[in-house]
Image: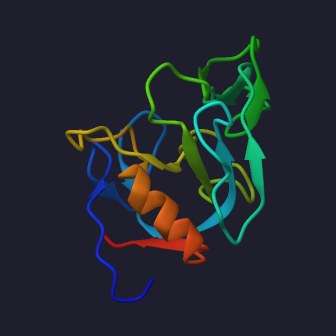
């Protein structure tokens, strides 16, 4: 990936070293790519250096800091607050799960920090990093294993 420049959308809350749940910020740091999720009904699995799993219509992600499943993938319906990973738009057609607040999980430090598909107008994310679909597939195919976010 060295030498490649790709336009990205970042969090509406800017880039922050002190990330908290709901602040809309993209966290500063070296974020390892843990795995990739994709919509099999909308495209083939990407070539990449990490495990790849298809999404299911009942997949979600818990963003409720008071619940034991906080910052983990869950099945919906789920008793805690969370977001659907199976969406009508294309933003989550391809999701790189980034290693933020996952080892260990700290309540309120932020959840669901993903590398995903950017909206056509590159609107800010809720804290994720978003690329054009072709750029995201290219980055994964080139062996992307981590992203460094500088503050």
Q: Quarter-wise, where is residue 135 in the image?
A: bottom left
The structure's colour scheme is rainbow
Residue 90 visible to an observer of this rendering: yes
Left-right relation of 56 to 38: right
Q: Quarter-wise, where is residue 111 in the image?
A: top right
Q: Quadrant of the N terminus?
A: bottom left
Q: Image point 53% across, 49% down: which residue? A: 114
Q: x%, y% of residue 139?
A: 49, 69
Up the image or down, 21 lies above or below 33; here it is above
Q: Image point 68% across, 37% down: which residue? A: 40
Residue placed furthest toward the left: 121
Q: How many marks?
A: 0
Up the image or down, 140 lies above or below 39; here it is below
Q: Image point 31% across, 38% down: which residue? A: 119
Q: x%, y% of residue 17?
A: 39, 62
Left-right relation of 105 to 132: right
Q: Quarter-wise, where is residue 81 in the image?
A: top right
Q: x%, y% of residue 16?
A: 34, 58
Left-right relation of 112 to 151: right
Q: Image point 43% across, 33% down: which residue? A: 22
Residue 30 visible to an observer of this rendering: no
Q: x%, y% of residue 126?
A: 38, 37
């Amino acid at each position: 990936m060295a030498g490649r420049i790709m336009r990205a959308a970042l969090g509406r809350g800017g880039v922050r070293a002190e990330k908290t749940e709901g602040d809309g910020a993209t966290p500063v740091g070296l974020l390892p790519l843990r795995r990739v999720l994709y919509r099999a009904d909308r495209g083939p699995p990407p070539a990449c250096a990490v495990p790849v799993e298809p999404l299911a219509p009942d997949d979600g992600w818990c963003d409720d800091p008071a619940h034991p499943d906080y910052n983990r993938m869950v099945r919906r319906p789920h008793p805690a607050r969370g977001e659907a990973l199976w969406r009508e738009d294309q933003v989550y057609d391809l999701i790189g799960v980034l290693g933020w607040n996952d080892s260990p999980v700290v309540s309120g430090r932020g959840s669901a920090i993903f590398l995903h598909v950017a909206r056509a107008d590159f609107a800010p994310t809720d804290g994720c990093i978003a690329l054009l679909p072709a750029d995201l597939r290219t980055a994964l195919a080139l062996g992307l294993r981590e992203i460094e976010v500088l503050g």
